[in-house]
Image (cartoon, helix red, strand yellow):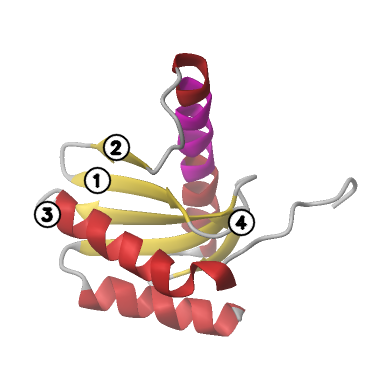
Amino acid sequence: MPGELYWLLDDFVTSVADVSHALILSNDGLKVASSRGLSKEDADHLAAVASGFQSLAKGTSLQFGGGAVRQTMVEMDSAFLFVTAAGQGSCLCVMTTGAADVGLIAYEMARLVGRVGQHLATEPRKAGQ
């Protein structure tokens, strides 16, 4: 499935307006697959950042009774970062330009996860991996 993931992510970047990068990561912050245009170093960094944001959101929700975390969004001066659950043990992370329609991005991310989420599951790492 990894080869197909790259194709899906590249298609997402080219077909959804204002999307710059997309990647699938494990909940513990390891890159599973990324769209073209992201160097290995940047993809690894973005996976770690996205995992951290998602973990913080889950911890906040747990502390204050917010329920399941559906999406984490970070608004910057000229970009947005979105992270959403994408199958057991995985997340979908998307970077956009600052001009992005956040509702459209959230909708398209949910559509992608709905179509292929069951194939995005990531097994937890075992000790020593």
Q: Which mark is residue 88?
A: 4
Please provide the residue range marked out in magenta: 50-60
| Rendered residue at 90%/48% (across/down) | 128
Secondary structure, mark 3, is loop
Tell me if 78 is positioned left or right of 38 in this view.
left
Distance from disc 4 to disc 2, alpha carbons, whole Å, reads 23 Å
Distance from disc 4 to disc 3, alpha carbons, whole Å, reads 27 Å
Contact between marks 3 and 2 (CB within 8 A): the answer is no
Q: Is residue 128 above or below residue 65?
A: below
Residue type highlighted by circle 4? Gln
Secondary structure, mark 4, is loop
Distance from disc 1 to disc 3, alpha carbons, whole Å, reads 10 Å
Identify the mark nearer the N-term, 4 or 3: 4
Q: Which mark is residue 80?
A: 1
* Nearer to us in this view, 54 or 21: 54
| Residue 58: % across, % down | 50, 31
Q: Residues within 10 Å of mark 4 (few under 14, many from 20)?
A: some
Contact between marks 1 and 2 (CB within 8 A): the answer is yes
Residue type highlighted by circle 2? Val
Front of the two marks 1 and 4: 4
Q: Image quarter for residue 21?
A: bottom left
| Rendered residue at 66%/60% (across/down) | 122
Identify the mark nearer the N-term, 3 or 2: 2
Q: Residues within 10 Å of mark 2 (few under 14, many from 20)?
A: few
| Residue 84: % across, % down | 42, 50
